[in-house]
Image (tube, helix red, strand yellow):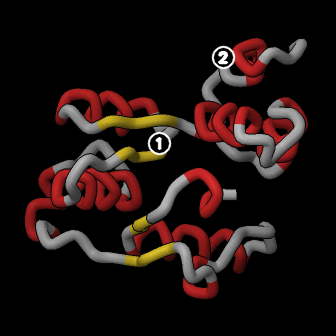
Amino acid sequence: MFPHLTTRVIIPGAVATELETGRKLGIDLPDPKTLDWIEIKSPASEPVLPLITDLGPGETEVLALALETEDPLVIMDDGPARRMAETLGIKLTGTLGLLIDAKRSGLIPAVAPVLDQLEALRFRLAAQTPNAVLLAGERS
């Protein structure tokens, strides 16, 4: 879905590691190393990363990369990470925003079934997200 919505996706090593951990647990997650439209990149500012203590390594590295990238858009659902991105002036969207864009682009027919699948995989969604399918013009 992503290559049809954007020209470039960069993820930090910590996110690739999180995906690998999920795959080892039997969760059907993509391997970014096999996708030519994803670049795995380490932030140059890694020495400052331990200073951000209230975020996970994936969120911390995403923010560090965003600060090093011209006109970034980060995809984050974690509340504290989103607040930090806003504080830093980084443009962001979340899973719901991405799914609404995919629906508007005709890549998926509906948002609600995808949210149901994510919920079944124990993907952490904000409490209001399932009701937000109304934003996509769907009934909740």
Horizontal side, residue 7 vs residue 120: left or right? left
At horizontal 53% and vertical 68% (from top left) the residue drawn is 18
Q: Quadrant of residue 49?
A: bottom left
Estimate how packed mark 1 is, as few (under 14), some (14 to 19) or many (20 or more) residues with alpha carbons within 10 Å.
some
Q: Secondary structure at mark 2?
A: loop
At horizontal 40% and vertical 46% (from top left) the residue drawn is 74
Horizontal side, residue 118 vs residue 38: left or right? right
Residue 50 versus residue 105 in the image, above or below: below
Between disc 1 and disc 2, whose residue precedes?
Answer: 1
Residue 3 versus residue 84 in the image, above or below: below
Q: Amino acid at mark 2?
A: Gln
The foreground one among 56 and 140 is: 140
Residue 131 lies, in percent from the top left, at 76, 15
The circle drawn on residue 100 is none
Q: Tell me the quarter of the image containing the C terminus.
A: top right
Marks 1,2: beta carbons within 8 A: no
At horizontal 56% and vertical 85% (from top left) the residue drawn is 33
Residue 38 lies, in percent from the top left, at 51, 73
Horizontal side, residue 97 vs residue 91: left or right? right
The circle drawn on residue 76 is 1
Q: Amino acid at mark 1?
A: Met
Residue 1 lies, in percent from the top left, at 70, 57
Residue 134 lies, in percent from the top left, at 77, 13
Q: Secondary structure at mark 1?
A: loop
Residue 91 versus residue 60 in the image, above or below: above
Q: How many marks?
A: 2
Disc 2 target residue: 128
Spatial CA span between label 1 and label 2: 15 Å
Q: Quadrant of residue 14?
A: bottom left
At horizontal 67% and vertical 69% (from top left) the residue drawn is 22
